[in-house]
Structures are given as structure tokens and as C-alpha cells.
Amino acid sequence: MPLVSMRQLLDEAAKGGYAVGAFNVNNMEQIQAIMEAARETRSPVIVQASRGARSYAQDRYLYHLMLAAAELYPEIPMVLHQDHGNSPETCKSAIDMGFTSVMMDGSLMPDGKTPSTFEHNVETTRKVVEMAHARGVTVEGELGTLGGIEDGHGAGVDALAHLTDPDQAAEFVKLTGVDALAIAIGTSHGAYKFKEKPTGATLRMDRLIEIHQKIPNTHLVMHGSSSVPKELQDIINAYGGKLRPTWGVPIEEIQLGIRNGVRKINVDTDNRLAITGAIRKVFVETPEKFDPRDYLKPAREAMKQVVMARMNAFGPAGHAADYQPIPLEEMTKRYAA
Ligand code: G3H
Ligand code: 13P
Ligand code: ZN
């Protein structure tokens, strides 16, 4: 199947009452892990590349790996999405490259750290919506800021400092015309989200529900949604790693979100943990090995298991065959109308 727009996946997910996992990639093994998981669970999927990923891998490599995936997995509807675009220029370069969806994260200034004003956010996001919709490409915006700075995204502040305001969210969607909205409800990027299992005071699902009630027809996006499972932390630490005790977003809270308008769920950290644990295990147990395939193969398998578990938990499993790909040209006409 050709790469499709994210709008099509999210609309279909809304009809089916599920959410599509959006998994970050930087290399071939991560793309292979996701595609194998999608085939085994028969799931649609969003593959996303951050700015860091695009510069690490050289985005042309990533794009062509995705074309290979489309050829090898014709039954899987998939999207290539720019994660956390920091400016209209970044989004334009992704669209020019063939990405079928972009995130314009105007909640922060182009440095990816400083919280911006509502006006700045509306202005930059609207610009990207005009440019992207003219080419049938989907746009995700963000209002409110996540916590954490360890991966270069987020405002570097307490995750509860800039929660999304439900009234502003409604205004933002009206003023920008975004297809999907990422909201801040207390999550942050990376492994260190919560110091203990989150409660209603630290993970504000009540806020998510309030936002959904204000904008029931807007697809909501949860960032920073790795669950940081203890089993994955334990494997890393058992083989010489040094992770401090930490908690992520429980799967049941994500499922509550899905019942309240969440249609895209971003997961990167859990896959990083799975990969790192598997590689550490090989290094410690068989230190004589030096063929990269000896550790990249178990790493890829470990990531596939995490992705499959998320596909089963978020509900897209079994839905790959529901899709008739809508060409981007047709999406352009629909936006114009
Ligand atoms: O947005 C956060 C993702 O985990 C990507 O992180 O910027 O280190 O590639 P990155
Ligand atoms: P995690 O760090 O929780 O995996 O979040 C990833 C993310 O939000 C990418 O945009
Ligand atoms: Zn994110």
C-alpha cells in the first residue's frame, strides 16, 4: 500500500474506537521491528521521525526504507510522520521528502525548549496547515507543553506547569484547522516521567476528558506515552545498566484516553529500553561476540514484542484490512472543499 495520510488513519480509528501507535525510528532495524509487529497483529501504523532522527539517519535513507516497507508489507496502511517539527521550514522539508503527515509543534519556540505564546503557536501552525493541506498532508499541532528536556523536547519544566486549557484548545483548533491536537496532561518525554505510579493529581486524565468534551470531533494525541515497564528496566539493570526507579504512563490510563478521543499515541522510550536491554544481555552473556547481527537481531525482536503489545492494547490490531488508501491528491480536494 502507498504511504497514506495520517488523517485517513485517525478518521478510521475514530470510527473503530481505537488509537494508532506512533513509533519513533532512527534506523532500519526499528522500521523492521514495527512492520513485523504490524503484520503479525494486522495493524495500521504511524512511523515517525524526529528532527534528531532525520539528521542522525539522513532522512533520505529513512524515506527509502519506508518505501521498501510499503513494498514488502502491502497489506499494512502506514504513515510517515514528522515528529515535533519546530518550524514551518522543517515541516516543508519533510513534505518535500515525501512524509505524509507533519507535526508543527508551535507550543515551543524553534529552539524546542522555550514555551511560545498562544499567538505564535496559532500563527506558525496555521501557516503549516495551509501549506500541508494544499498537498493532502496531515497536520498535528500541540497546545500546552510537556515536561522533560532529556531528549531535547519539552519546556524543561514541571510537566504540570503548562497543561492544555480546554477553552484555548477549542479556539486553537478553530483558528488553525489542525487535523489532530497533542495535549499536555502531565506526561513528559523520556524514561523519568513519574517518581511513583501516577495518580489523578500527576497524570491529569480529567483534563483530557474535559478537552475531549469541548472538541469531540478533534483527534487527540498523547505524547510521552511510554509505560516504562519495570521488566524492561530490570533487564537493563541486570546487565550493568544504571536506571533509577521510575514510572511511565499505565496502559489502562491510555485506554481511558482512547475512550475519550485519543487516536494517536506516541511511544519511543519503551522501544529504546527494549533494544538496550537486549543488546546489554548479549554483551554480558557472550562477550566474545562482535558481529552486529548477533545483538541487533535480539534487539529488533525485543522491540517487535513491545510494539505488538502496544498494538494489541491500543486496539488497532486486526484493523489493517479496513483501509482503501485515499491518494494525497484526493485529500487535497477534500481539504479544499
Ligand atoms: O519526541 C521525542 C522522541 O522520543 C524523539 O526523541 O529527539 O531524541 O529523536 P529524539
Ligand atoms: P516517550 O518518551 O514516552 O516514548 O514519548 C515519545 C514521544 O512523545 C515522541 O514524540
Ligand atoms: Zn513527543
Image (cartoon, grey):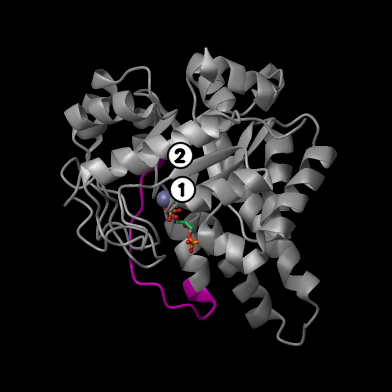
Q: On the picture, is 6 further left or further right than 142?
A: right
**Front residue of 309 and 132:** 132
The image quadrant where one finds the N terminus is: top right
**Up-down: is 233 above or below 45?**
below
Badges 1 and 2: C-beta atoms under 8 Å apart? yes
Q: Residue at x 43, y 52 (%)?
A: 87
**Up-down: is 161 above or below 56?**
above
| Element assignment for label 1 | helix
Q: Residue at x 21, y 33 (%)?
A: 207
Residue 12, picture quadrant:
top right
Q: Is residue 183 visible?
A: no
Q: Residues in magenta?
A: 237-251
Which residue is label 1 attached to?
A: 88
Which residue is label 2 attached to?
A: 128
Q: Residue at x 72, y 81 (%)?
A: 286
Q: Which mark is residue 291?
A: none
Q: x%, y% of residue 231?
A: 48, 59
Q: x%, y% of residue 71?
A: 84, 39
Q: Cα distance, mark 1 to mark 2? A: 6 Å
Ligand 3 closer than 8 Å to the CB at disc 1?
no
Residue type beneath disc 1: Pro
Q: x%, y% of residue 291?
A: 81, 78
Q: x%, y% of residue 132?
A: 53, 35
**Front residue of 142 and 228:** 142
| Element assignment for label 2 | helix
The crowding category of the residue bearing disc 2, from other C-alpha atoms within 10 Å (few below 14, some 14 to 19, many at least 20), is many
**Residue 243: within the magenta?**
yes
Residue sitting farthest toward the top: 337
